[in-house]
Amino acid sequence: MTLEEYQKQALTTVIKSDNEFRDLLHWVLGINGEAGEIAEKIKKIIRDKKGEVSKEDKTELAAEVGDVLWYLAVFAHHLGVPFETIAQQNLDKLQSRKKRGVLGGSGDNR
């Protein structure tokens, strides 16, 4: 499946309101909420399992990554940018940073 195919299918499960800003806020909060669930699971693995990640943990984390992916695909559509374009632009940016030796460091424009 391509990212374009995924985005199209993800959009079939969107529930929109009559308020564009409310929808935008919902999707942005969804991205953060699902990413937070990943962080919580990792925190508990560190706290309760001494950092030992089980097969079950990986399955649960993968499900949460899927939820983040869904919100990102929907948000990208709202921006009017194909998900594949966003993915390619990100890889291009990272390859450029690698080539210039600035993968590490801080700041968006390096």
Image (cartoon, rainbow, N blue to C red):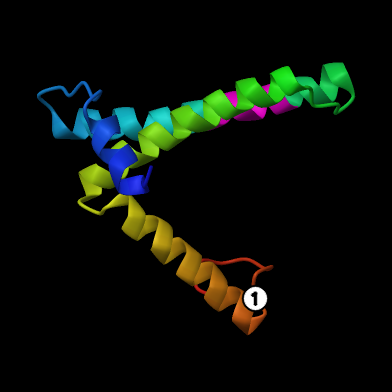
Quadrant containing the C terminus is: bottom right
Q: Is residue 36 left or right of residue 85?
A: right
66 over 108 or under it: above or below: above
Q: Is residue 41 left or right of residue 37?
A: right
- Residue depicted at 82% across the width and 26% down the height: 46
Quadrant containing the N terminus is: top left
64 over 102 or under it: above or below: above
Instruction: Measuring from the top left, give residue 64's x and y in whole percent.
Output: 54, 26
- Residue depicted at 36% across the width and 57% down the height: 86
User: Observer-nearest residue: 104 or 70?
Assistant: 70
In terms of image quadrants, where is residue 23? top left
Residue found at the very far front of the displayed protein: 1
Circle 1 crowding by C-alpha within 10 Å: few under 14, some 14–19, many from 20: few
Dominant secondary-structure state across the stretch colored magenta: helix
Image: magenta residue range: 35-42
- What type is the residue that disc 1 sits on? Val
Instruction: Measuring from the top left, give residue 53's x and y in whole percent.
Output: 79, 26
The residue where tag 1 is placed is: 102
Instruction: Measuring from the top left, give residue 62's x and y in whole percent.
Output: 58, 29
Q: Is residue 31 magenta?
A: no
- Residue depicted at 84% across the width and 16% down the height: 48
User: Observer-nearest residue: 13 or 31?
Assistant: 13
In terms of image quadrants, where is residue 16? top left
Helix, strand or loop at mark 1: loop
55 over 83 or under it: above or below: above
Residue found at the very far left of the displayed protein: 18
User: Observer-nearest residue: 93 or 1?
Assistant: 1
Q: Is residue 75 left or right of residue 42?
A: left
In the rendered picture of this protein, how many numbered marks are placed on residues? Answer: 1
Instruction: Measuring from the top left, give residue 2's x and y in whole percent.
Output: 36, 47
Does the image show residue 13?
yes
